[in-house]
Image: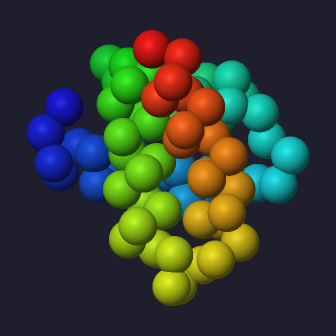
């Protein structure tokens, strides 16, 4: 997955993530629009989104903080 695709998935994660959403639900939602995305790519996009948006939307960044490390360590 190239940088522009990671950015697109990261932006989608920021739109989709809600408090209490499970990692499995989030991966499923992303794969509806990006079926080729692997869990590893989605986790990388989540880290990118956290870094890129932490100062703009702290709540959503915190929600992704629970998701990204959990998915990254499962691989």
Q: Residue at x 46, y 74 (%)?
A: 53
Specify the farthest residue to the right.
20
Q: Quadrant of the N terminus?
A: top left
- Residue 3, given in percent of the width and then of the height, sits at 16, 48
Residue 29 seen in render: no
Q: Residue at x 63, y 40 (%)?
A: 67
48, above or below 72, in the image: below
Image quadrant assignment for residue 25: top right
Q: Give the camera-side residue of 41 and 69.
A: 69
- Residue 37, given in percent of the width and then of the height, sits at 35, 24
Residue 52 seen in render: yes
Q: Left of 75 or right of it: where is 25?
A: right
Q: Residue at x 51, y 75 (%)?
A: 54
Q: Residue at x 71, y 72 (%)?
A: 59
Q: Give the camera-side residue of 72 and 15.
A: 72
Image quadrant assignment for residue 71: top right
- Residue 13, given in percent of the width and then of the height, sits at 53, 50
Specify the farthest residue to the top.
75
Q: Quadrant of the C terminus?
A: top left
Q: Left of 24 or right of it: where is 47?
A: left
Specify the farthest residue to the front.
73
24, above or below 58, in the image: above
Q: How is the image coloured?
A: rainbow
Q: Give the camera-side residue of 29 and 19.
A: 19
Q: Left of 39 or right of it: where is 57?
A: right
- Residue 56, given in percent of the width and then of the height, sits at 53, 84
Specify the farthest residue to the bottom.
55
């Amino acid at each position: 997955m190239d940088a522009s695709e990671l950015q697109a998935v990261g932006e989608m994660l920021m739109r989709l993530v809600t408090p209490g959403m499970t990692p499995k639900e989030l991966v499923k939602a992303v794969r509806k629009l990006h079926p080729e995305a692997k869990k590893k790519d989605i986790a990388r996009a989540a880290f990118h989104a956290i870094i890129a948006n932490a100062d703009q939307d702290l709540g959503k960044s915190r929600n992704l903080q629970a998701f990204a490390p959990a998915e990254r360590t499962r691989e």
